[in-house]
Amino acid sequence: MGIFSALLGNAGAVDKDTLVKDYSKLLITGETVELGFKLIRDTFIFTNKRLILVEKQGLTGSKIEYKSITYKSITRFSIETAGTFDLEAELKIWVSSEANPSIVKQFNKSVNVYDVQNVLAHHVLG
């Protein structure tokens, strides 16, 4: 992920082994990491059981919030692909009956948003 994209808040893909090493304490028995992305300070991880959002807070980032969202609570999602001159794609996820998306994330072009859509569709529709 380039520094320019990082400064804009775009997400870049993270290696599965790195995610397992860094966040294994969050995983339950039988839960595996399928896909993950990192922003400047935040990480979101798609597992075979749920979506985990890791959000660092405060100036030092020492306070961390871990959000766990089960796939069955995701009611809809959308992927907006990058245009010819656009540097990013966007993911929106609605949880339960909320009118506005609960989660909105920007991806840089290094991320295949169709992989993200595939994981979500597999778990939400499956």
Image: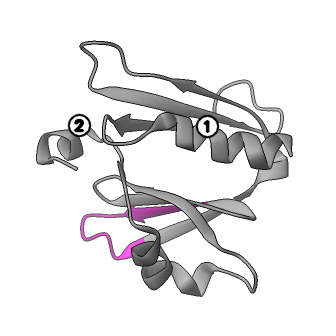
Q: Nearer the viewer, residue 71 or 55?
A: 71
Locate residue 25, reporting x and y percent: 57, 87
Using the image, determine if residue 89 lies above or below residue 126.
above
x 65%, y 47%: residue: 119
Mark 1 is surrounded, within 10 Å at the Cα level, by few (under 14), some (14 to 19) or many (20 or more) other residues, namely: some
Task: Tell me: residue 49, above or below residue 7.
Answer: below
Colour scheme employed for the rendering of this structure: one colour
Q: Image check: 17 left or right of 1? A: right
Relative to 52, say whether 20 is above or below: below
- Looking at the image, residue 112 sits to the left or right of residue 31; the answer is left
Q: Secondary structure at mark 1?
A: helix
In the displayed orientation, state which residue is furthest to the top: 84
- Residue at screen point 55% across, 84% down: 24
What's the residue type where badge 1 is placed?
Gln
Closer to the camera, 119 or 38?
Answer: 119
Dot placed on the residue nearer the N-terminal end, 2 or 1: 2
Which label was assigned to residue 8? 2
- Give the amino acid type for the residue marked by disc 2 in the picture: Leu
x then y, percent, for residue 120: 68, 44
Residue occupying the far left of the picture = 3
Q: Residue at x 39, y 66 (%)?
A: 15
Residue 56: which numbered mark, if any?
none
Residue located 82% across and 47% down the image: 73
Q: Classify residue 22 by image quadrant.
A: bottom left
- 51 lies above or below 99: below
Q: Is residue 62 magenta?
A: yes
Q: How far separated are the C-alphas under marks 2 and 1?
A: 22 Å
x then y, percent, for residue 8: 23, 37
Q: Which residues are magenta?
A: 52-63
Classify mark 2: residues with Cα within 10 Å, few (<14), some (14-19) or many (20+).
some
The residue that disc 1 covers is 117
**Residue 107 falls left or right of residue 91:** left
